[in-house]
Image (tube, rainbow, N blue to C red):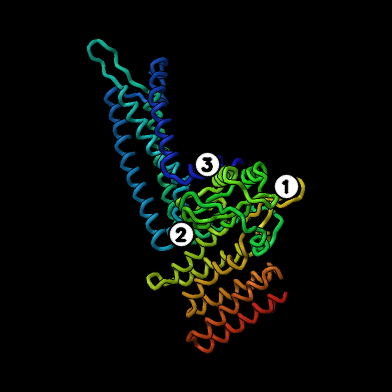
Amino acid sequence: MDVPLAQLRDGFRTKLWPIPTLTVLAAIALGLALPQLDGELDVSGSNLLFGGGADAARTVLSAIAGSLITVTSLTFSLTVVTLQLASSQFSPRLLRMFTRDLVVQATLGLFLGTFVFALTVLRTVRTETGGEPAFIPRVSVTVAFLLATASVIVLVLFLGHLTQTIRVESMLRSVHQGASAVVSSVSGTVGISLDTARRSVPDHARPLLASSSGFVIDIDEERLMRAVLDGDASAYVERRVGDSVVSGTPIGWVWGSTGVPLDADRGDALVSEIDGCVMTGFERTDFFDLSFGLQQLTDVAVKALSPGINDPTTAVHALGHSSALLCEMSQISLATHRVRDGDGETRLVLAGHAFGDLLGLAVEQPAIYGSDDPIVMQRLFMLLREVAWTGGMSVAEPVTDQLGRLRRLLDRTELDPLDRATLDDAAERVSAAVKGRWAP
């Protein structure tokens, strides 16, 4: 899929207004066209269509319009309350999950569309006055009745969906599924170490400056590669998707592929072209951001451990999802990777994620805020054990580092001797998993 098109679709889905707006426009068009069809058809004798007079048609349409706008207000209120609950009790970064919910968008669209359709049809109803014949759009009134009936059914389904969605289990599962999709989209690349990538930047390299502040939401690798090839240059982009950047600060470097410094005109053109390949936004998204889902899960765990909420069970549940996600990440290449040209020369280097940073993101803050809770600490040790077993020797060093961190936290924490013995045993099991043994 073309990247700008994919981003446009993602932006469309994460807004509450596009689908309801399109539905309202469709309802206006239908409300104008269907009465025209009514004027061409003779359906006065049908038992399946509306059979009342003009006054009855106005009453029905007015009742539908009045009730639907009330129900729409109720639906908006419930949605706003849900957003407030998710923001205050779990994490403000979960709000995107609700705003892109197609059920919420479609429900609002149906309610608003039915309301507008009823109003549009209402203006066409005429009584017999001044010799002008009465006009009763029987098909249109029947369609309005069917839409109102469907709205009642959808309201019941929406309430059931909403109560299911605000459960922490459902939110954590949705975050996990979205993050897993991003992990699955990461393809194998030629990995190199971060130190090697930095040493490849010559002293005369020209810095690439961020043109705007915000978060990196995407790096168009194909377009970036074309830019360096056309400019006979090489480039190293240090910032990754999800990183915060400040306007005017370096996000990478570019230099001539022959080792000769770039001249001013050529360098300006190349820097301008590369700048368009690195897109920034005012908020992080889970579209290409590998660590965003893990950040959301960690936020839920830390929020649950706060004194105002004090819900270690939710924290443990979130850590379980973090563990599963880290085990998936341990199976893919996260290293800084390079892109070569047709001659095998490295022309583009993009910074990747270090697994140790991702593991620290999931472990460090929950460990700090949950160090005095044996249940939370035991789940953290189990997380390290599961990651060590799944990732093998490739993750042995970061797992060992985090194991040492947890042990130092335990040494500074007042715990019951029985709890301390249990956690010491859990730490030993992590050490065994690092060596490839899962102790019974």
Q: Which residue is mark 1?
A: 341
Q: Quadrant of residue 33?
A: top left
- In this image, 428 relative to 305: left or right? right
Could you say where residue 392 lies in the image, as x and y percent from the top left? 71, 69
Which residue appears at 48% of the width and 71% of the height? Answer: 313
Residue 318 position within the rendered picture, expressed as x and y whole percent measured from the top left: 52, 66
**Number of disc labels:** 3
For residue 113, side relative to residue 254 (left or right) = left
In the rendered image, the residue lying farthest to the bottom is: 417
Give the secondary structure at mark 1.
loop
Q: Return the residue nearer the eye: 159 or 47.
A: 159
Looking at the picture, which amino acid does disc 3 mark? Arg
- Residue topped by disc 2: 167
Quarter of the picture holding the N terminus:
top right
Quadrant for residue 385, please give it: bottom right
| Circle 2: element type | loop
Mark 1–mark 3 Cα distance, whole angstroms, equals 31 Å
Q: Which residue is mark 3?
A: 9
Neighbours of disc 2 within 10 Å: few (<14), some (14-19), many (20+): few
Q: Residue at x 57, y 84 (%)?
A: 422
Eye-nearest disc, 1 or 3: 1
Q: Nearer the viewer, residue 271 or 166?
A: 271
